[in-house]
Amino acid sequence: MNERTREYLRGRFGDHYRRSDVALPPAASAREWGFIPFTAGPGTTMVRHKALVDLGDLSTFLVDTCPRHVYFSGGQYDDPGTRSMEEKGWRGSDLVFDLDGDHLPGVDPDADTYAEMLEACKDALLGLLDFLHGDFGFDAEQTSVVFSGGRGYHVHVRDGSVRTLGRDARREIVEYVLGAEIDDFDRLTRVETVAGIGTKNPVQKQTLKTGGGWGQRVHDRLLTLTETVQAADKADALDQLGTFDGIGEKGASKLYEAMTERGEEIAAGNLEAAGEFTPRLARRLFERAVEEESVPIDEPVTTDINRLIRLPGSLHGGSGLLVTPLDHEEVEAFDPLVDAVPTTFEGTEIRIESETEQEVELGGETHKIQAGNNTVRESVGVFLMSRGRAEKAPE
């Protein structure tokens, strides 16, 4: 980024903040603050260990400083402005989740477009919210959803029950969302003695836990498969059951019999309906559930109680897009390449220089950029310059 581009962006970021009212996060004065200014050279300089009192009025700070990036801490402290983490006096931290589109399974940053990565990331976000609401019981008032302005989304959980959790406890939450307990399927079942008490050969019954969580997810899949088998031709049903690893022809026959004749036992979570093959099938369904329903959150962000995170309402200096807080009912319809484009950068055109021919999806349109000088919408120009894909041309 050359000096002309840097000064142009810095000035326009300042214009944006003059027109904006950026809200403070809860307990803002107890949080550490940090920012990255528009500095010369290829690198960046993080300014951190600031208290809100050091910045002064937030709106005035944003207008006067015109930072490239703005952050606040998930943690709350007695003295957030001291440089020593030990001396800050940690009180507790939000539970923060970070989803990046270019880190998702099945996403190829070299082949997929920015829009495609963001759409895949929104699907992952919806899965994460399902975990937070359905498995952990956090409601919408306790969870704050934010488009990061860059590659994905942040979710802040501000429930008192998680605020003082340490790193190890937060890691357990990460492992649960990732489905990292896949090697311990037995945690999803209960075993109880139901007959033969007092004899040498007591009978034990293994039952799938169906009250929620991964056990419920496996049970839902088992019920769906049972309904499919019951509605299918026998030969087709046997073929489908036989595709699961470790089932084979014998297991498919036993499972078919159990599903068509003792479906109520399976509905009750009984893993003995087809002998050894029911728990074997349930394990395979668990593996599929983890593969398809686990959410690839960024573990270091969630486990770090001192993490700085982007300020909602600020601009992302690597895209020029707005770090956008979202109501839960807005998530599905939200299009970041339309809805996070700042109005400050709309309604006018600017000149930019591009070294290569390229395409940009923004504002609901695909913009074709030629090598050399181009006249483009300012929002497109700011996006390309912020991402290092263009420079500001002399007017």
Image (spheres, rainbow, N blue to C red):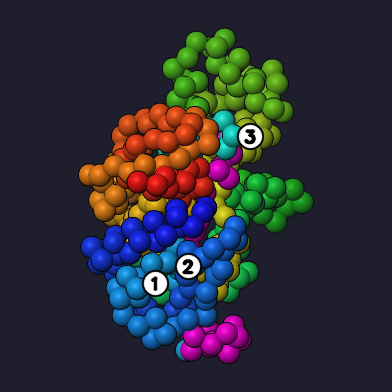
Q: Earlier in the sequence, mark 3 or mark 2?
A: 2
Can residue 331 be seen from the camera position used here? Answer: no
Q: Which residue is mark 3?
A: 284
Mark 2 surroundings: few (<14), some (14-19) or many (≥20) residues within 10 A: some
Residue type highlighted by circle 3: Arg
| Residue range highlighted in magenta | 79-107
Task: In the rendered view, tell whether residue 266 sits above or below residue 145.
Answer: above
Residue 242: x and y in percent read 65, 20
Q: Earlier in the sequence, mark 2 or mark 1?
A: 2
Mark 1 surroundings: few (<14), some (14-19) or many (≥20) residues within 10 A: some
Please give the name of the residue rendered at 47% of the width and 14% of the height, measured from the top-left corner.
232
Residue type highlighted by circle 1: Thr
Measure the alpha-carbon separation of dots 2 and 1.
7 Å
Q: Which residue is mark 1?
A: 65
Measure the alpha-carbon separation of dots 3 and 1.
56 Å
Q: Nearer the viewer, residue 278 or 99?
A: 99
Residue type highlighted by circle 2: Pro
